[in-house]
């Protein structure tokens, strides 16, 4: 999966793809690439329990002290995998309308969650083990959702949804059913799900469901 | 949290509540109650890594061979916690309209995910460690969502949503943003979220977003 297809899923460069002719950053960047590829491979093949600095160093063909010095521990390695995944030029597609943009986004999320092995799913599982991974995952998603807000701004400009639509609430509503079904409920994938969830969120947004509701009465805020 | 308030969250009887005057099932049922209470307490206080049959037996004041014989291992204990949580008379509230019913449901889910400590969140985390827990969690949620389908049938009868509305898709759309934000994105709770997510799903359902869409053309199903 190329970086431009990563969306809110997390992946690395295709390990079977030929290496680019020139890599920026020199030796240090090459070591980082090899180590992070080893973390992803070790995680999806062996799981978190067998993800150790020594196993990663051996897999990457890098001296273990190099890994310890630069990443410190498994949490540091996982956090850097996520930081590296977010360090790209990914932007949501512009299909011309809101339901189409959200469907395109959901198709990318769906692909990341259903590919086998799924680095995304493995990193989500790891976030329940490592506070550093959980923090890095939160940062990654925050950045991805922030990039997607342009989808909502375009829809407002086209008059598809009301001004004042809460972009983040709409984006979470569109994508959440995929994560809920595939990661938590663990229901077998349904290829119609990305489009359905996207259209439902777009319809609700058009009806004003994601604009700030009037303050509730009688609750007496403190 | 009393069993009748468990919704799609998972909890046990309030450990500080007085014991009921009579318990059905006799000694075996009392042992089960004590052991499952010990599993929940051990899980939320110490986490999965310190959840062992021996620790549970000691905490419950039950001989370890009793626990091994009946539950076998940690997976068996977690599965029984989930099976016991589903063994109740819980039904979704009937507030008179769809948005109200979904909001009431979401308020229960929100409470289960934000209480501290949260047995629900701890069991979700455990489902990434134990295949038996993952299976039991899938069964538990399947049963909870099935019970909630009455909410959608009532809305169809009242004419709030079209006949042919996919109840499960609507219920997942209504509840998924809570799980996504609180369990995966780990965003601080927002008391407005249960109502917003419920209203957005209800609006989309009223507009027909959860009825079977026409078959897509040009995809050539196999």
Image (cartoon, coloured by chain):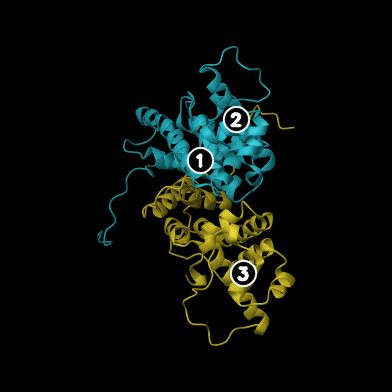
Chain colours: A yellow, B cyan
Q: Secondary structure at mark 3?
A: helix
Q: Which residue is mark 1?
A: B175
Q: Is residue A184 above or below residue B84?
A: below
Q: Position of residue B142 (x, y in %)?
A: 43, 38
Q: Secondary structure at mark 1?
A: helix
Q: Are marks 3 and 2 in contact (CB under 8 Å)?
A: no
Q: Secondary structure at mark 2?
A: helix
**Whether residue A69 can be seen here:** yes
Q: Chain of mark 2?
A: B
**Whether residue B8 can be seen here:** no
For the point 66% across and 55% down, the residue is A130
**Would you identify the image quadrant in which residue A65 lies?**
bottom right
Q: Nearer the viewer, residue A153 or B188?
A: B188
For the point 58% across and 38% down, the residue is B120
Please state if A121 lies on the left or on the right of B19 as rendered: left
For the point 48% across and 68% down, the residue is A5
Q: Disc number at residue A56?
A: 3
Q: Chain of mark 1?
A: B
**Would you identify the image quadrant in which residue A140 lies?**
bottom right
Q: Which residue is mark 2?
A: B35
């Amino acid at each position: 999966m190329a970086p431009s297809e990563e969306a809110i899923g997390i992946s690395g460069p295709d390990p079977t793809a030929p290496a680019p002719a020139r890599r920026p950053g020199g030796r240090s960047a090459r070591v980082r690439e090899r180590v992070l590829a080893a973390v992803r491979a070790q995680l999806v093949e062996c799981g978190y329990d067998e993800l150790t600095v020594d196993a990663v160093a051996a897999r990457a063909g890098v001296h273990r002290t190099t890994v310890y010095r630069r990443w410190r521990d498994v949490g540091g390695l996982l956090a850097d995998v996520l930081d590296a995944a977010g360090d790209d030029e990914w932007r949501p597609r512009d299909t011309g309308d809101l339901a189409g943009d959200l469907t395109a986004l959901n198709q990318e999320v769906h692909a990341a969650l259903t590919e086998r092995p799924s680095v995304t799913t493995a990193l989500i599982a790891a976030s329940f083990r490592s506070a550093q991974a959980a923090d890095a995952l939160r940062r990654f998603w925050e950045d991805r959702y922030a990039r997607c807000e342009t989808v909502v701004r375009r829809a407002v400009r086209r008059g598809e949804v009301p001004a004042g639509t809460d972009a983040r609430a709409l984006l979470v509503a569109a994508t959440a059913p995929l994560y809920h079904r595939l990661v938590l409920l663990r229901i077998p994938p349904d290829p119609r799900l990305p489009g359905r969830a996207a259209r439902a969120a777009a319809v609700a947004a058009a009806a004003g469901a994601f604009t700030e509701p009037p303050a509730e009465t009688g609750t007496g805020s403190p």
